[in-house]
Image: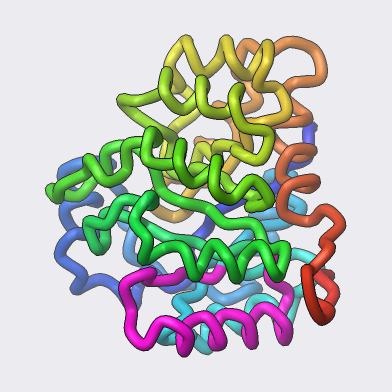
């Protein structure tokens, strides 16, 4: 069984049951099951990870409101769980949020920062993101940015991958990963990844069974080192995503890169902060 790393899981969805846009995602978009709004403890997930061959997973922590539940995962099993720090680029004062992010990254196993443009309807080419980009470069901390039309009934043009064109030109040192696929702009996303060495894509919240032909072709050719597996569990069922991924028609060696190697290199690779020293990632 090919081992896996999951680049995006949620462990506190039960605490977000009253968030209206998540209700719409569950009921209208993903047709989610009873586990969609469920919270977990480390002991709930570790046996499933062992059974499915998932070696590590990235859990989301909101920097503005750190969840004690999420922090328990990296405190109790730092060899299995690492943090993805969710940021709001429009939050004021700007530096306060960045200092909070840096403190969390220095004191807990952290492998990326995360932003979701549709939440504020601000495209990632907007200057309000620039302090975050700068801080991520200084810390050599990878950043994921959601791309593709979002599931909730909100404006989604801000998540067109073309907005990353200027970002990649201006911040070539930034380790950048598109998250939640890029539908319906797969062609733009793959062309940008060919163009920029620092740009990758993560398939969180997108069932492998429904990957478009152009993505599979890219994975089998020039993009074999660019595409990273993730589930968005429990929004999408873990077992379904892993089994569908293992059943993809991929060339020899590509499945290992997709399920494990690319995430290991991108998120857990060697770091070279531009100043100071980061706490080691376990």
Relative horizontal placement of residue 224, taking residue 20 as reference (left or right): right
What's the residue at 62%, 62% (across, down)? 112
Total number of numbered discs in the rendering: 0
- The one of 217 and 237 positioned closer to us in this rendering: 217
Whether residue 154 is visible: yes
Q: Determine the residue located farthest toward the front in the rendered image.
A: 170
Where 236 falls versus 95 (above or below)? above
Left or right of 44 on screen, residue 209: left
Percent of width and height locating residue 267:
72, 54
Please say whether residue 43 is one of the residues in the magenta stretch.
Answer: no
Q: Is residue 255 above or below residue 282?
A: above
Determine the image quadrant of residue 36: bottom left
| Residue in the foreground of this view, choosing between 269 and 232 | 269
Residue at image point 79% right, 56% down: 268
Decide if residue 24 is on the left or right side of residue 8. Answer: left
| Numbered range of the magenta stretch | 85-111
Would you say residue 31 is visible in this rendering?
Answer: no
Quadrant (top left, top right, bottom left, bottom right) of the C terminus: bottom right
- 132, 68: nearer the viewer: 132
> Where is 107 relative to 158, above or below?
below
Q: Position of residue 252 (x, y in %)?
A: 80, 13
Q: Indicate the quadrant where residue 160 lies.
A: top left
- Image point 32% across, 65% down: which residue? 37
Residue 84 screen position, x and y as percent: 58, 66
Q: Is residue 103 magenta?
A: yes
Give the vertical position of 244 relative to 94 (above or below). Answer: above
For the N terminus, give its image quadrant.
Answer: top right
Residue occupying image coordinates x 78% and y 29%: 256
């Amino acid at each position: 069984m090919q081992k896996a790393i999951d680049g995006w899981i949620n462990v506190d969805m039960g605490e977000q049951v009253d968030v209206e846009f998540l209700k719409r995602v569950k009921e209208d978009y993903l047709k989610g099951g009873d586990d969609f709004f469920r919270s977990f403890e480390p002991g709930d997930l570790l046996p499933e990870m062992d059974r499915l061959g998932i070696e590590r997973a990235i859990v989301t922590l909101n920097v503005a409101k750190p969840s004690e539940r999420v922090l328990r995962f990296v405190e109790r099993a730092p060899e299995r769980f690492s943090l993805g720090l969710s940021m709001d680029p429009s939050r004021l004062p700007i530096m306060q949020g960045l200092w909070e992010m840096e403190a969390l990254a220095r004191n807990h196993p952290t492998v990326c920062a995360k932003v979701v443009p549709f939440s504020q309807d601000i495209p990632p080419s907007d200057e309000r993101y620039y302090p975050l980009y700068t801080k991520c470069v200084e810390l050599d901390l990878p950043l994921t940015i959601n791309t593709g039309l979002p599931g909730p009934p909100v404006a989604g043009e801000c998540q067109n991958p073309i907005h990353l064109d200027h970002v990649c030109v201006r911040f070539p040192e930034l380790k950048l990963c598109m998250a939640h696929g890029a539908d319906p702009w797969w062609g733009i996303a793959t062309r940008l990844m060919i163009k920029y060495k620092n740009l990758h894509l993560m398939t969180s919240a997108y069932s492998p069974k429904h990957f478009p032909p152009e993505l599979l072709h890219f994975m089998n050719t020039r993009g074999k080192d660019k595409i990273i597996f993730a589930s968005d569990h429990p929004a999408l069922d873990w077992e379904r995503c892993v089994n569908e991924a293992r059943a993809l028609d991929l060339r020899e060696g590509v499945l290992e890169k997709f399920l494990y190697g690319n995430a290991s290199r991108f998120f857990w690779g060697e770091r070279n902060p531009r100043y100071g020293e980061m706490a080691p990632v376990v």
